[in-house]
Amino acid sequence: MMLASRPLADRMRPRHIDAVAGQEHLLASGKPLRLAIESGRLHSMVFWGPPGTGKTTLAKLVACHADALFLCISAVLAGVKEIRTAIDEARALRETEGRGTVLFVDEAHRFNKSQQDAFLPFVEDGTVTFIGATTENPSFELNNALLSRLRVYVLKPLALDAIRALIDRALTDETHGVGERRLTMAAELRDQLAAVADGDARRALNLLEIAADLAETGAIDAALLKQVIGSGALRRFDKGGDAFYDQISALHKSVRGSAPDACLYWLVRMLDGGCDPLYIARRVVRMASEDIGNADPRALRLALDAWETQERLGSPEGELAIAQAIVYLACSPKSNAVYKAFNLATEDVKRSGSLEVPLHLRNAPTRLMKALSYGEGYRYAHDEPEAYAAGASYMPEPLKDRRYYEPVDRGLEIQIRQKLERLRALDANAEPMKNDSGTRVRSR
């Protein structure tokens, strides 16, 4: 393909390790990946990172430095047939010329387990050096057999200054960039373009190429750039991907950490990235129960109100209500006592099986049930002093002394703790009661 007909992002692809933008944590002097590339000693690997961070570029540099054939297949388009064809070509090259082959698998996470298994024998015997590229977490998306044979390198989004330097170079490079057009573009507009790219070099160059093609007067001005980028690119937020779960985790932990400003930042990041506000509202309800609980029961009601507001009014009114709710949750006293108690009770249910309901707690709507002592000995709390049947037991006999809920010394749970302590003191001084077997016991 002629150089001029290739996309700008492809023409500007670095041809030497020192020209790679960013990724200093992998490519600085003495770093493992740089040493591997410079030595030409190949090993199978996977590059994990957001789009436009240099995964394909690094794979090509690995092949170039090792004087290996570079074969590329896309998991979006290829199947087992394409894998076999690539393997046959690699095997023939090794037998005839003694050269190795780098098999680059783009979007590797899109291959299913059987397709991933197809690589194993050829990675194992050295027919190919496997290099995968993925935007998803390899520990979730690649099977263990393949992952155990690869080294994972994490690529980071490019810093703003790295993107800006790339834009400057593309505007002045007359061979690979658009320098021969002698375009003018103010410094503040280059900064704006770099910011919109959001760490994605390919996005920055694609937008620059569109702007260059539209610049009939030779100037990329503010009006033209606004036309190209529209209202602004969405930030990284791939629903179902790592960015999705990382950001909802950051929001939840900011609420738990009583950091309202951080809560607002992550909320806006998610909304800006296209997250469904109703999903956020549902998670805020979870936060209200898990991290605030009975320390401030109003938090749950406010979270539900925000959810309902979003359903009824939509955006932007609903989003503001969600913002109000998360700020309130962040500033509320915190308690995970109910959350912990629920988990402990769940563990007991799974471990202890189907324990019988004590006879005195059973309903007795028929004569037969009454004859079998259903409901016998039950004490109606409203008929007791302070509406509390001191010493009564409500748990199955094997779990009669089990406690799950321990209120914290924050918010309303201070009063709840004080009440429970007073009731337990009444239990301790109550007359012994009989259990279902007739044995006299003291309930605690």
Image: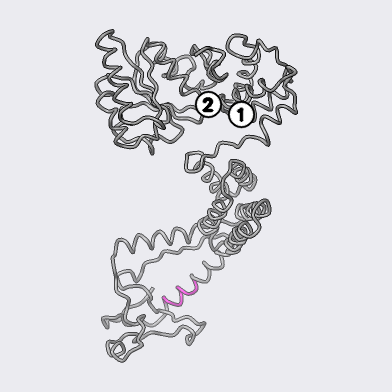
Magenta residue check for 206: no
Left or right: where 112 falls relative to 278: left
Q: Which residue is mark 1?
A: 197
- Tell me, yes or no, whether the two marked residues, 2 and 1, touch with CB atoms within 8 Å: yes
Mark found first going from the N terminus, 2 or 1 = 2
Task: Tell me where the magenta segment starts and ends, as one range.
Answer: 421-428
Q: Could you tell me residue 349's position as x and y percent?
A: 33, 64
Residue 52's tag is 2
Label 1 Cα crowd, 10 Å radius (few <14 / some 14-19 / many 20+): many
Q: Could you tell me residue 6's position as x and y percent?
A: 54, 17
Q: Is residue 272 above or below residue 327?
A: above
Disc 2 marks a residue whose amino acid type is Gly
Q: Could you tell me residue 278's position as x and y percent?
A: 57, 53
Residue 152's tag is none
Magenta residue check for 423: yes
Determine the secondary structure under disc 1. Answer: helix
Left or right: where 298 falls relative to 406: right
Q: How is the image coloured?
A: one colour
